[in-house]
Amino acid sequence: MPERRENSEPILEVRDLAKHFPLTQGILFKRQIGAVKAVDGISFDLYPGETLGIVGESGCGKSTVAKLLMNLERPTSGTVRYKGEDITKLSGRALKAVRRNIQMVFQDPYTSLNPRMTVGDIVGEPFDIHPEVAPKGDRRRRVQELLDVVGLNPEYINRYPHQFSGGQRQRIGIARGLALRPEIIVADEPVSALDVSVQAQVVNLMEQLQDEFGLSYMFIAHDLSIVRHISDRVGVMYLGKIVEIGTETEIYEHPTHPYTQALLSAVPVPDPETEDGRERIVLEGDVPSPADPPSGCHFRTRCWKAQQRCAVEEPALALPENFADTLPEQPVHHPSACHFAAERTAVIPPSSR
Amino acid sequence: MTLLEVRDLHVDFQTRDGVVKAVNGVNYSVEAGETLAVLGESGSGKSVTAQAVMGILDMPPGRIPKGEILFHGENMLTMSKEERRKIRGARIAMIFQDALSSLNPVLTVGYQLAEMFRVHQGLGRKEAKARSIELMERVKIPAAKARVNDYPHQFSGGMRQRIMIAMALALEPDLIIADEPTTALDVTVQAQVMALLADLQREYNMGLILITHDLGVVADVADKIAVMYAGRIVETAPVKELYRAPAHPYTKGLLESIPRLDRKGQELYAIQGLPPNMAKVPEGCAFHPRCPAARDICRTELPPLAEVDDARGSACHFWKETIDA
């Protein structure tokens, strides 16, 4: 929410974050022949109590961003500041202390829960690592409380994951994420493995928990409709870079980057009558390999606006030149990494225009 | 004559936990050039019905105790294996969700396409290869001539799905069954593949059965919809009418529970509870434990698929109230 942003400091500041995975050749003497630029210099802020959505297609680097924020991967360069402290440089005890405050919810509730542990053990395991949060005798009660909070029957504490449905398992994953009372939850595709009717239950639960505990969410997903529903601000990723970032309204109703526009126009809307009055941009070809991204603007190979300038000069993620004289309260006034940024509203279904 | 008509189809599976009735009396029909979308969540029986039509159901453990599948008016369930085999692939073709596991990884795509012509039409190697290249161009694979000798893993997900489509089209079938054809693909690629499928369908005047859980994709391409729940069709309607005024609480709940790109709603409506375990389907209307409008009759009496108008049906005791609400 914008009003929350103005009077608070960001809780997480990400600057020029990059992760390049080396490609090697040779068996005994490995030499590097290149790198997969999974994340290639991204910057954003996360404010307390807000949800920042990250959308993009497979291979754009959005899950690597999640791992970098959790410090599960060391970045090639760049910083992640949590309350002013760079967590990418931390290790040992200091890192452990920070991790308590940043927790993760994974995509697949079938593989992210240990099948040999009971629900009580799974949800209570964070307390083994951070015993200061809950004294030993108190743990069972705390776990039951957590199960209750996520809408599971507290009596299920001795059951095993296979005795639950997909939606219930995702609730267990969320309870585990909440156990240490974190400030930030990084959720990587938390509902994409669930059936439509169950997705809504989990999304509603996440929103309710956010209000209750004042959590900040990084919500990473490929489903643009769900991201719009839950997010206050949204960043669009393409080949390791954020190409456009802004509030939910700015991105979904006034997109200025051609990729965002193509992405939005490709999402089918469950209403044949709005579908009829809509412009479709069908992109040619596939996403290029992140091991060998195009020069200049990464999107130029699929872009209908691409010109010579796009091949040589990489557009920065900033307010585009042609919107320089717009006022900050105008919705087109937001960063967009395109030399020829322009508004194109016909791609969005009319009911939201 | 109707291209395909499924009448009162039942499919069950023998399992250790007893008989699972996956499909319980499904009726639907498709005409040439028409697209029927079969919509449902996992376990609703939508794919099993399609497998029965295609004749690729594993039997045993599967069994078809009752029902008819009429293709051009002939019941395929009473045909000999040999007769069925002539229809499968040549006159009814199928596109699967996961192209990578549906293609043979150790054979080139050219070989796999050419095989269709060699087996079904007895063409020679050279001629079959030429036809394969033609087909790859048809589904807009760039540099088809150069890529015909590539293996499936050398193609991207969208390209592989195009090859699956090419394979389904090879013998110019009358009917294509597409089981979640774009679920594994990214949105921009999904749009490409659906546009291609729709173009080809128009060109060849084929019937298309699109099996999906995605209400968005359906809105875009289907002519009519059959919504399945717990092995039955609970609602059938022309596409626009279904979205405008659903006549079954399950359809209504589904439509309200999905977040929409064009709307920023408050809280999402969530259908309570879970889809039923197919070994223990609830008595009466299978949806009653999750239905906000359930009454006593719903717990005891199975609602038939009532006729709403000529083109619509709803298996709800209270469809009139649902449609007006």
Image (tube, coloured by chain):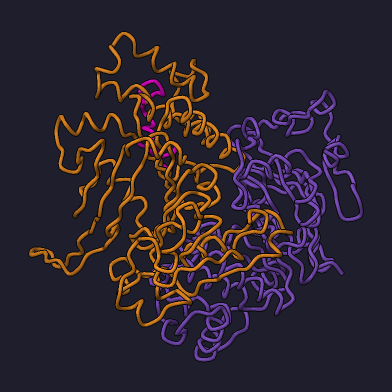
User: For this view, does A148 lie left or right of residue B266?
Assistant: left
Residue A70 vs residue B105, the one in the foreground: A70
Which chain wears purple?
B
Examine the rendering and report whether any part of residue B68 can be seen. Answer: no
Q: Is residue A99 left or right of residue A329?
A: left
| Chain A on-screen colour | orange
In the image, residue B272 lies at what x, y percent? 64, 30
Tell me which corner region of the image, top left, top right, bottom left or bottom right, holds residue A141. Answer: top left
Horizontal side of B146 relative to B194 (left or right) equals: left
Span shown in magenta: A104-122
Asked if residue A218 can be seen in this view, the reply is yes
Q: Quadrant of the C terminus of chain A?
A: bottom right
State the residue at coordinates (30%, 74%). A313
| Residue B145 counted in the magenta span | no
* x and y, in percent, of residue A175 in the image: 42, 27
Picture residue at 36% right of the left edge, 42% below the top: A46
